[in-house]
Amino acid sequence: DGGITQSPKYLFRKEGQNVTLSCEQNLNHDAMYWYRQDPGQGLRLIYYSQIVNDFQKGDIAEGYSVSREKKESFPLTVTSAQKNPTAFYLCASSRRPTTRQETQYFGPGTRLLVL
Amino acid sequence: GNSVTQMEGPVTLSEEAFLTINCTYTATGYPSLFWYVQYPGEGLQLLLKATKADDKGSNKGFEATYRKETTSFHLEKGSVQVSDSAVYFCALSGNTGTASKLTFGTGTRLQVTL
């Protein structure tokens, strides 16, 4: 079955530690996205990528980094510079990045908690 | 910039009641409009979408019509079930530069009781 997988489901971060969230898709989609969801709020865009080896900052990129070395994979690193990392992180993909009619498909999410 | 406003929840209904969740938007140009649903502890699933004015999206008994004159995309269902309990997000997609990005509302929690 085609889809988006995220791992781990839960992740714990210690103070000053960098952690990496995995996102893999087998939909052959060009574009991938990372969102952050806080309780009672909508989703906010962290980073997005339209093509391999290229990515752009979203609305709340500070304290995060990404890479796109393969079409299928778009890992997100939460660095120690992100002072409030506790949130639910959602990865999404879409077939074509530049068409407003395209649907974004979401993974199951990773919940990040700070110890 | 683009924005989406949804009615605040939670919305509590009895099974078989009629559902309306209001959504209005502000955007330049001609955005596409989406409703996503999120079940507890899960990611978002597309419920329905509409890509131009007067289009009606529909799925699983849910409907929403793209009303450009009132900048609205209200979600409706004639008879809700307990299994419809979830958080519903309205979103719009409008090209910004060369990328199509989603702008989300804050979500509306629906609870359906027997």
Image (cartoon, helix red, strand yellow):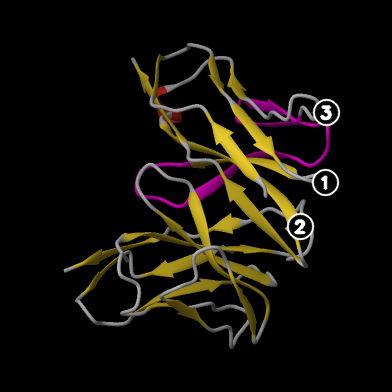
Q: Which range of residues does the magenta coloring cover? A: B38-66
Q: Residue furthest front?
A: B1
Between residues A108 and B97, which one lies in front from this camera angle?
A: B97
- Residue B101 visible in this rendered orientation of the protein: yes
Please give the residue where the numbered disc 1 appears in the rendered image. Answer: B29
Left or right position of A102 against A61: right
Which image quadrant for residue A111? bottom left
Q: Quadrant of the C terminus of chain A?
A: bottom left
Distance between the Cα atoms at labels 2 and 3?
A: 20 Å
Q: Residue at x 48, y 40 (%)?
A: B106
Q: Residue at x 37, y 51 (%)?
A: A38
Write down the chain letter for disc 3: B
Q: Residue at x 76, y 57 (%)?
A: B95
The answer to whether mark 2 and mark 3 are in CB contact below 8 A is no
Please give the residue where the numbered disc 3 appears in the rendered image. Answer: B54
Residue type at the position of mark 2 = Asn
Residue type at the position of mark 3 = Asp
Specify whether disc 2 shares its chain with disc 1.
yes
Write down the chain letter for disc 2: B
Element type at marker 3? loop
Please give the residue where the numbered disc 2 appears in the rendered image. Answer: B95
The answer to whether mark 2 and mark 1 are in CB contact below 8 A is yes
Left or right position of A106 against A52: left
Residue type at the position of mark 1 = Gly
**Mark 2, other Cα within 10 Å: few <14 / some 14–19 / many ≥20:** some
User: Does label 2 or label 3 sit earlier along the sequence?
Assistant: 3
> Is B59 situated above or below B78?
below
Residue B89 is marked as none
